[in-house]
Amino acid sequence: MDASAPPPVAPDPARRTRGPAAPLPASRFRRLLTPVGVMAAVVAAFGYVATVDPNEPGHYPVCPMLRLTGVLCPGCGGLRSAHAFAHGDLVTALGANAVAVAGYLLFAAVWLLWTVRAARGGPPPRIGLAPGYWWGVGALLLVFSVVRNLPFGSALAP
């Protein structure tokens, strides 16, 4: 070692020892910005559907599958369901599209989990389902579509 070189400096325990590439933790405000922004967009969309009634013709386009084939798809009645849900009429919302109402409730649960984790500084929830679960969701939607188009399943039709 060169005698003219300064001696090595011991690290200051008060300094952070994260290393040069490690980012500083985000503030609670920054962590909550994304989930709050997503909820603001959802509230705006539901607010629009609540004010522009999908039960009145001409406000929204007709379902292409319904128009071309006369068959109700799994999403048919979703806007009417959202309109009723936004007005607090859960029975009408379920009658218009029960799967959509289940989707609203599932979204609310995932969003709540996401927001709590963000507030606590944890990672966002990961929705990594095995392919079998996705096939199950697809099968459920297919059965829902078929049943709502049959005479005995007319209660599921909007």
Image (cartoon, helix red, strand yellow):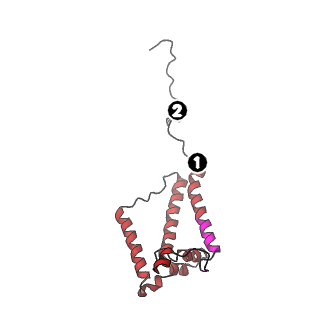
Residue 26, x across and y down, in percent: 56, 47
Task: Look at mark 1 in the image and give the residue it sits on.
Answer: 27
Q: Is residue 60 magenta?
A: yes
> Which residue type carries mark 1?
Ser
Quarter of the image where one finds residue 119: bottom right
Q: Is residue 43 magenta?
A: yes
Task: Look at mark 2 in the image and give the residue it sits on.
Answer: 13
Residue drawn at x 62%, y 75% is 59
Distance of mark 2 from mark 1, alpha carbons? 23 Å
Quick one: which residue is furthest to the top in this view? 3
Residue drawn at x 54%, y 58% is 115
Q: Is residue 47 above or below residue 120?
A: below
**Magenta-highlighted residues:** 42-62
Q: Please state if 37 lies on the left or on the right of 102 as rendered.
A: right
Label 1 sits on a secondary structure element that is loop
Q: Please state if 68 lies on the left or on the right of 48 as rendered.
A: left
Which badge, 2 or 1, is on the more N-terminal residue? 2
> Which residue type carries mark 2?
Pro
Label 2 sits on a secondary structure element that is loop
Q: Is residue 126 above or below residue 1?
A: below
